[in-house]
Image (spheres, rainbow, N blue to C red):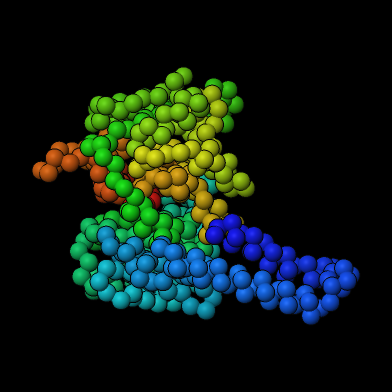
Amino acid sequence: MAAEFTELSAQLEQSVTRNNVDGIDVELELGVSRPDAVGRHQNLSMRWKEIVNRIRGLSGFTTFLQPTPFHLLAPAADEGPVIIINVSTIRSDAIILQKGVEPDIVNLPDATPEAVNVMSSRMEQALGVPASGECEQGIKLVLRSLWEFIVQFIVRRLEERGLPRSSRIWWCPTSALCLLPLHAAGIYQSDQPNLPDIYISSYTRTLSTLIRARNLEPHSAVPPSILAIGVPEPDGDDGADAPLQCVDAELDRLMKHVPGTELLEGLDASHDAVVARLPTRPWVHIACHGHQDTTQPFQSRFRLQDKPLTLREVIRTNLPNAEFAFLSACNTATGDRNTPDEGLHLATGMQFSGFRGVVGTLWAMDDVDGPDVVDSFYKFLFRKKKDGKTGDYKEAAKGVSRFTKMLRSREGAREVPFERWVNFIHVGA
């Protein structure tokens, strides 16, 4: 049936496109009368509709070539609200999906495309001068604008609906909002609200992606085994990337909390070794330089010891056990301002490959934070619980929330700069 559908689709496409090429009626040139051509097209169209109806009669294919009905998308909110944000010149809204209630629409009158583009430009300018007062003020202004234009109205509605504090929520942004840190929105002044202190945020590109991540069969190993990859300084380094001084310390912290971790570090972290071992473990922790290729997203890559591992190669690798990935590398969740809706970067690529949850970074992380971040994250996820379970990938977002709060308070009254903690995000289930 699949072959018949493919063949009919190709014939129908040819019938539509060959009737007129560069203004010349091809059927008449070939001596075929117009009525005969129309009749043949109608016959193909009828046969195509018939086979589509037959396919829709098969189990699991009832919506084949149709928009997914809402009752199949609603389960995306089974474990917490999902907030879809649409920005338009006509009007901008947030759609809140929440289990057991009808979808709720929150109008966002100030979230115009112009306002979002200003925020996006301001963030880009701030990150262009890292580790500076200008960067700090620029990010703070963007976070405040996100709160005032968008997030405060959504939080208010969630509170009205009785969502307890510290609950998980999922952001599903569109257009230029895909490039902005909604998860960190806030005023950041004394006694003023900030989203990270209210709810625990994750991201999803689509509702279907989130549903699929949750519906995959759970891995049987408890606790899950981890493949840790560390490349402080790859071979043939041209000086574009500074050596990562804290990778060894980072992996030591990981091994402390998960002693059975398989380690590929330095010379052992070759391209072929990583490709060979990646399918054998459900969890992977990658500490190396990462590069986002905005012109060819599938060429985005992790810099391994001898040569890079591209996103294309990861996606083509069969990963039957994939469950969770921690990408302790720079720019692993960086979007492209020219095509923000496409959202293909290393983090979403890992999720597309089968990983149900991924921790990534929106921009370059500070190498010095790696050991403390890893220590806080894995200590929480692999703590001993009353039910005996440990290493639950669904607690990863909470782990991110915990270590970002740790970073914010680590230097006492003087918080670390925004650029050192806002960049961490969780994607997926």
- Position of the N terminus, as image quadrant, is bottom right
Q: Position of residue 109 (x, y in %)?
A: 44, 77
Q: Position of residue 136 (x, y in %)?
A: 42, 50
Q: Residue at x 31, y 48 (%)?
A: 217
**Foreground pick, 78 / 374:** 78
Q: Residue at x 37, y 76 (%)?
A: 105
Residue that extends furthest to the left in the rendered view of this protein: 386
Q: Is residue 68 above or below residue 214?
A: below
Q: Is residue 277 visible?
A: yes
Q: Position of residue 376 (x, y in %)?
A: 26, 38
Q: Residue at x 41, y 62 (%)?
A: 60
Q: Residue at x 48, y 78 (%)?
A: 91
**Foreground pick, 64 / 341:** 64
Q: Position of residue 241 (x, y in %)?
A: 53, 31
Q: Is residue 368 visible?
A: no
As drawn, is 122 to the left or to the right of 95?
right
As drawn, is 413 to the left or to the right of 83?
left
Q: Is residue 55 above or below residue 160?
A: above
Q: Quadrant of residue 228?
A: top left
Q: How many marks?
A: 0
